């Protein structure tokens, strides 16, 4: 591993105040301030890695090193419109590509895409900035200084997990270097290499991410009021629905409502499903419906879900627990008691049903 030494020279101006400070320091000939940085050289962009991390306290030299090695790739924050919806700020991108990118960074609430950047929360603005950098910055590498510096711990955690998952899926065709003072993001971002500027040490290899354990439990109908603003459909909740919450350390982070499928005995369907925006992009929704499918199966029901979210459709298609039943490219119209009911006509949707894993079925075949 190659050690590098950088000497940063800052000239000292000649003024009365400067002379007073120099005199007090008993350095009458002081004409420049020299700072020396010694550190392991970071990997080059040509090497096989996808995410790198430069971490250190303020003044440790992390931004200087980033400028020296990745200066051409440093992302300059964009100027967002005060009035345009953020979904319209990516003119060169097809809607499907943009929707997938938003979901990949954990910004999946489509109703929030309609807002101008200035009206979003700090966490949502951070995710929009990530999306802008990863989609629109030129070149095959982007370096982001002050990564997650202005967001809370939970947002830094979930955004980092979402990014790592996205890079593992190949969602972005760039390499990323995150520069930050926050050491807590390392365990969630799982960088392929980390340069610690406080020790000057380069460490290669991903850290082992700590597990996030979410509980699924029955929930009162009143909890829907907290999640309704994040749902893309009407805020009403069917009175016959059975409600559930996914909780982390006792706090609800996702909500679901399940009800009987009209005219189909032994089948129930997901009536509402929404994840708190702070926790989107890390697999909470998929794990939640997996658990609900297993619960309903234990109760003797087959659980169905209909969705138009492209990222969620891909997640269900990859799962061994969900079977694609039917796709409706132009949506469908529902009927109830012989009358046409409000449905999803005009909006492409896909229907899935929960099934036991292939491995379990194979084991049963072997036993019998």
Image: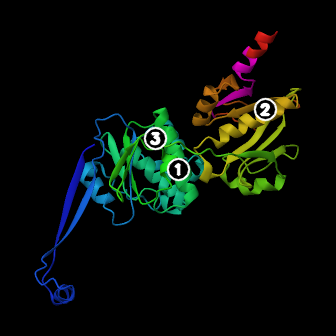
Q: Residue 159 carries which label?
A: 1
Q: Is residue 206 left or right of 355 when viewed as pictured?
A: left
- Residue 318 image-quadrant placement: top right
Q: What element carries label 2?
A: helix
Quarter of the figure with residue 319: top right
Position in image of residue 316 (x %, y %): 64, 30
Q: What element carries label 1?
A: helix
In front here: 72 or 5? 5
Earlier sequence position, callout 1 versus callout 2:
1
Which stretch did the figure color magenta?
Answer: 347-362
- Nearer to us in this view, 19 or 337: 19
> Is disc 3 placed on a helix, strand or loop?
loop
The numbered disc on residue 295 is none
Residue at the (32%, 39%) spot, across then down:
140
Which circle's residue, 3 or 2, is located before the other in the chain? 3
Q: What residue did someone put label 3 on?
A: 206
Residue count near mark 2 (Cα–Cα under 10 Å), binned few <14, some 14–19, many ≥20: some
Left or right? Give the position of 15 relative to 1. left
- Look at the numbered discs 1 and 2 and tell me whether their residues touch, using CB distance below 8 Å: no
Residue drawn at point x = 65 percent, y = 43 percent: 284
User: Could you say which disc has been placed on residue 294 in the image?
Assistant: 2
């Amino acid at each position: 591993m190659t050690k590098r030494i950088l000497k940063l020279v800052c000239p000292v101006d000649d003024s009365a105040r400067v002379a007073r400070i120099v005199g007090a320091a008993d350095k009458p000939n002081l004409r420049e301030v020299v700072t020396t940085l010694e550190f392991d050289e970071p990997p080059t962009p040509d090497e096989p890695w996808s995410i790198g991390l430069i971490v250190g306290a303020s003044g440790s030299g992390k931004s200087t090193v980033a400028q020296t090695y990745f200066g051409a790739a440093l992302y300059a924050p964009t100027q967002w419109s005060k009035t345009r919806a953020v979904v319209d700020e990516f003119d060169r991108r097809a809607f499907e590509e943009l929707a997938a990118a938003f979901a990949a960074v954990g910004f999946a609430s489509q109703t929030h895409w309609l807002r101008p950047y200035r009206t979003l929360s700090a966490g949502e603005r951070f995710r929009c900035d990530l999306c802008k950098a990863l989609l629109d910055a030129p070149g095959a590498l982007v370096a982001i200084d002050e990564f997650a510096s202005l967001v809370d711990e939970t947002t830094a955690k979930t955004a980092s997990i979402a990014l790592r998952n996205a890079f593992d899926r190949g969602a972005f065709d760039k390499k990323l270097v995150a520069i930050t003072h926050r050491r807590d993001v390392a365990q969630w971002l799982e960088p392929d290499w980390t340069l610690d500027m406080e020790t000057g040490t380069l460490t290669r290899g991903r850290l082992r991410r700590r597990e996030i354990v979410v509980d699924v439990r029955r929930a009162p109908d009143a909890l829907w009021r907290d999640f309704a603003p994040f749902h893309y459909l009407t805020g009403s909740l069917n009175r016959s629905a059975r409600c559930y919450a996914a909780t982390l350390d006792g706090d609800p982070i996702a909500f679901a409502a399940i009800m009987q499928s009209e005219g189909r005995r032994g089948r129930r369907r997901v009536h509402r499903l929404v994840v708190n925006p702070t926790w989107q992009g890390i697999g909470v929704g998929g794990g939640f419906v997996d658990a609900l499918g297993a619960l309903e199966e234990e109760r003797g029901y087959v659980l169905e879900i209909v969705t138009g979210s492209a990222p969620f459709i891909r997640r269900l298609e990859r799962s061994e627990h969900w079977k694609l039943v039917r796709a409706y490219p132009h949506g469908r119209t529902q009927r109830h008691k012989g009358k046409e009911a409000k449905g999803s006509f005009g909006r492409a949707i896909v229907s899935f049903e929960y099934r036991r894993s292939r491995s379990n079925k194979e084991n049963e075949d072997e036993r019998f």
